[in-house]
Structure formats: structure tokens, C-alpha cells
Image (cartoon, coloured by chain):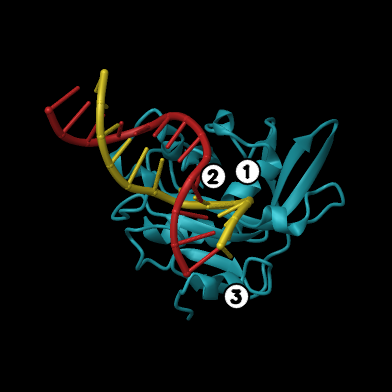
Chain colours: A cyan, B yellow, C red
Amino acid sequence: MAQETGKAARFLLGKHLVWRTLGDWAALRITEVEGYLPEGDPAAHSRAGRTRRTAPLFGLPGTAYVYLVYGVHHCLNVAAEGEGVPGCVLIRAGVPIVPSAPSARELVGPGRVCRALGIDTRLSGADLVSGGDRVWLRDGAPPGEVETTRRIGISRGTQLRLRFVERGSASGAGRVILAGEEIG
DNA sequence: CCGCGGATCTTCT
DNA sequence: GAAGATCCGCGGA
């Protein structure tokens, strides 16, 4: 349900995304996400039903869904609802929380996040909750004030206010103005 | 099998 | 501010 995807998106704000690097690990705190609804969302990849690519969206909550956009960038999503219900949350930005993490700018933007984490479609279908893979989710301090706006970079379903940004983060107000979005 | 368009980012002016 | 990069999943034939 829409409400569940929205809740999941908010829930992920402040959580930590941890990944293995060469003999080490790094982590970011999630500061910007977008929800994509299982039904009635013309921007959702699941709108065409279950295909080989989108199958992870129909998996258990916490399942990774990675796809390639514009032939160049990868985007990381997290399945958000029950099995068979393809709601998901796009990870759009984070801030570094350990010295080994990439710089702040490299973690703003869904394509940059994936590049920084070394993520590609091979991670699609992985379980980010129980860990065991290269990338996983951990608990983190709850976000402060959360700003809700329309989603970025889509041509359909633009009226839905499913983008959530932790106010004050690098991906916050400045981007909203650049994107010409409404606030509040 | 072919054609299209995209949940982006970088570079150039 | 504008456009190019560069690929693949999907839908239609």
C-alpha cells in the first residue's frame, strides 16, 4: 500500500548503509530517499508487472533492486512491502559517517551512491537486512526534521509527494530549489 | 528483431 | 542552462 511504502521510505532515513571495501568497510547515513508505489504509480518500474529485471521488487522487504539508467548510472532500491507487493524505496543520497567513506559530494545522487559503493546490477536481489552480502543496512539515529517533496527526474507520477529529505543534509533545500519543486 | 526512452551525471558555454 | 554519454529492458511487429 502507498502508506506502507511511504512509511518504509521514512523509516530508512537515518539508517546506515554499510559496504565492504578492499579489506575494510565504509558506511553512510541515509539522508534522502524516494518511494515508488506498488500500485497506481506510473513512475514505478513495477508498473509493467513482474519481469526478470524487476523480480527483486516483489521480494521480501530489504531486498535490493538495482537497475541501470541512461546506460550509465546504477540506482539502488530497497523492496519495501510484503512479498509479492512491489513497493520500493530509492536511495538517493547519504552522508559519510566513517573516515574511510567517500567524501560528502560523492554520496549525493543515486548514481553517485552506487558508484561510491561499487554497486551494479549484480547486487540486485541481495538481502540487505540479514547481511552476508557486500552491502547491508544497519540501524542509525533517527533523522531530525524531514522534508517531503515531489520526486526528482521523472516524467510521470510527478504529483506524488514521496521524496523525503533530512533537512539540513547536503541533499536538502538547495536541490529542491534547483529542481523547481514545491515545498510544504 | 528493431526501436524507444529512461527514478542521472558530467562537461561545456 | 543545455546537451551528450551509452546501454538495456520492454513492447510491438
Residue occupying image coordinates x 80% and y 49%:
A101
* Viewer-closest of A83 and A34: A34
Q: Earlier in the sequence, mark 3 or mark 1?
A: 1
Q: Are marks 2 and 3 on the same chain?
A: yes
Residue occupying image coordinates x 68% and y 67%:
A170
Q: Earlier in the sequence, mark 2 or mark 1?
A: 2
Where does label 2 land, which residue?
A: A75
Binning the other alpha carbons within 10 Å of mark 1 as few (below 14), some (14 to 19) or many (20 upward) gives many
For the residue marked with disc 1, what is the amino acid? Cys
User: Do the numbered discs 3 and 1 sit on residues whose CB atoms are within 8 Å?
Assistant: no
For the residue marked with disc 3, what is the amino acid? Ala
Residue A143 percent across, percent down from the top left: 67, 67
Q: Report the Cα–Cα distance between label 2 and label 3.
A: 22 Å
Name the quarter where the N terminus of chain A is drawn. Answer: bottom left
- Quarter location, residue A145: bottom right
Give the SS element for disc 2.
strand
Could you tell me which chain the residue with mark 1 belongs to? A
Give the SS element for disc 3.
helix
